Image (cartoon, grey):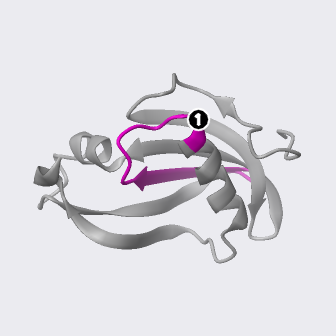
Amino acid sequence: MLNQSSQDDFLLLSPAPSQKVSLKFSGFFEGNDVVWNLTLFTLHEYYLNTTQTNESNDIRQFIFIELLKSSHEVVMNIALDVPIIDKPTIIKTIMMVRNYKALHHGWHKWGPVITISQY
């Protein structure tokens, strides 16, 4: 288990800053200590990665909790309306996940619908 003593305790699995960053950090999910296996995207990068399945140019910020890799590891994707995923964005995202009281499997969408042509 990764140490949860500080908000910036995380393990980068890919380089940052970037449009897409993979990392792991500790937290709680459904009352259990877990390691979050997170892929963090900019909205634009997520759209580019899903062009085969996207039927529209509209997208919103989201958290998607896919599945439990094991009883202690949870897979999650998050897309944010930011120009780049850097260390401050990573730290704010970790704080958001650790403080989000109603997390559950599936989609959590928020914010205005963004039309990708705006980029």
**Can you give x and y, in whole percent of width and height, for residue 47 in the image?**
24, 48
Which residue in the structure is indicated by mark 1? Answer: 87
| Secondary element at image label 1 | helix
Q: Residue at x 31, y 46 (%)?
A: 46
Q: Residue at x 26, y 45 (%)?
A: 44
Question: Is 104 drawn above or below residue 38 in the view shown?
Answer: below
47 or 29, which lies in front?
47
Which residue sits furthest top? 15
**Can you give x and y, in whole percent of width and height, for residue 116 in the image?**
17, 53
Q: Residue at x 66, y 38 (%)?
A: 24
Q: Residue at x 25, y 62 (%)?
A: 59
**Residue 72 visible, this orientation:** no
Question: Is 40 drawn above or below residue 81 in the view shown?
Answer: above
**Can you give x and y, in whole percent of width and height, for residue 79 in the image?**
41, 52
In the figure, is residue 94 to the left or right of 62? right
33 or 41, which lies in front?
41
**Residue 2 visible, this orientation:** yes
In the figure, is residue 119 to the left or right of 2? left
Q: Which residues are magenta?
A: 70-88
